[in-house]
Image: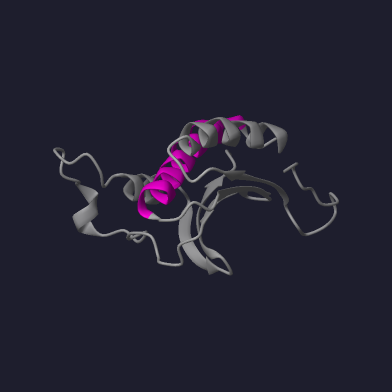
Amino acid sequence: MPPASSPASGPVPTSWRIELPHSSAAVPMARALIRTALADLEAPAADSDTAELLTAELVANAVEHTSGSGPIELVVELLPTGCQVEVHDGDPGPPGNLESSEADQCPDPWQEHGRGLLLIRTLSSDCGHRRTDSGKAVWFRLPAPQ
């Protein structure tokens, strides 16, 4: 799906959307696609590494924790204050805890999982989730460098 854009004077931000397979192949695809999207949207380059890491975490969570074979959708929006990345999946259930808690601040070093949402909470300027007509969207925002 090609990037969608709005008139420069309009209030709607520029956005980029693409469907990914509901499989582990979606993670490396998402890493490459987020870099392409941010470059196409002319987002600040300083956000690319963090955006790539956090996008990969959201896509991996969608693949691992949701059932079904429907696609996962990656949405990148360029905002006046930075960018917002959303990952849509077909499961309406909320993701794990996106709110900070003391228990999450020091994950068990022997556990293989459990750090993705901590990374998202720590490295993004804001994050959350919302229900959609077909499931949910989990999102994070990154500010533009100053």
> Would you identify the image quadrant in which residue 144 lies?
top right
Q: Looking at this view, is 10 or 62 the one in front?
A: 62
Q: Position of residue 33 (x, y in %)?
A: 59, 34
* Residue 62 appears in the picture as rendered: yes
Q: In the image, is 67 to the left or to the right of 86?
A: left
Q: Looking at this view, is 20 or 13 the one in front?
A: 20
Q: Main secondary structure of the magenta part?
A: helix
| Magenta extent | 45-65
Q: Is residue 65 above or below residue 3?
A: below
- Residue drawn at x 77%, y 47% is 4
Q: Position of residue 17 (x, y in %)?
A: 66, 47
Q: Position of residue 129 (x, y in %)?
A: 47, 62
Q: Looking at this view, is 101 or 33 the one in front?
A: 33
Where the N terminus falls, by quadrant? top right
Q: Looking at this view, is 22 or 112 the one in front?
A: 22
> Would you identify the image quadrant in which residue 3 lies?
top right
- Residue drawn at x 84%, y 49% is 8
Q: In the image, is 4 to the left or to the right of 63?
A: right
